[in-house]
Amino acid sequence: MSGELPPGVEQDIEELGGIEILRRMRPDTSVIARLERLYDLLSCRNRVMILFYLNLAPMTPGVISELTGLKPNLLTFHLKRMEASGVVGSERDGRYRIYSITDLGRTLLGGVNR
């Protein structure tokens, strides 16, 4: 490593085993790719808003559309992406599809409740 480090930073790195150990801890490219997809998913205001509402209660697309103002085709697009990423899940209840937030979705919201 080139240059000097502040004592606290140097100590923390050494406690982890040094720079070479940290270099070997580099995450697998598949982990990085998954994180990129999740953060890309959350870079859309509409999807964050959908997550916010689903964090309050499971909902049908009609309710979500009413709350967000999203047209049904756009809402369907977002919900499919979110379900494929594992941040929301859905199940059928008769003629209704009910969406709910997953543990991963709650984690990504970071404790935002209202």
Image (tube, rainbow, N blue to C red):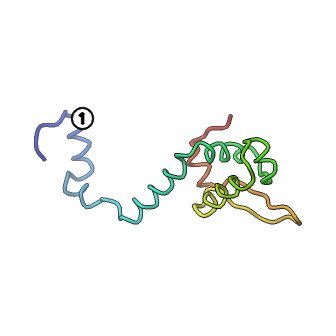
The vertical placement of 28 against 70, above or below, is below
Which kind of residue does numbered mark 1 sit on?
Gly
| Residue labelled with disc 1 | 8
The vertical placement of 104 against 55, above or below, is below
The residue lying at 80 percent from left, 54 percent from top is 60
**Where does the C terminus fall, quadrant-wise?**
top right
The residue lying at 42 percent from left, 61 percent from top is 33
Camera-side residue of 70 and 37: 70
Q: Quadrant of residue 95?
A: bottom right
Q: Quadrant of residue 68?
A: top right
The vertical placement of 43 against 77, above or below, is above
The residue lying at 67 percent from left, 37 percent from top is 113
Badge 1, how many Cα within 10 Å: few under 14, some, many 20+? few
- The image position of residue 9, as x and y in percent, is 24, 38
The residue lying at 71 percent from left, 48 percent from top is 54
Camera-side residue of 77 and 82: 77
- The image position of residue 110, as x and y in percent, is 56, 42
Judged left or right of residue 35, residue 110 is right
Secondary structure beneath dot 1 equals helix
- The image position of residue 108, as x and y in percent, is 56, 48
- The image position of residue 17, as x and y in percent, is 23, 53
Camera-side residue of 8 and 101: 101
Judged left or right of residue 75, residue 25 is left
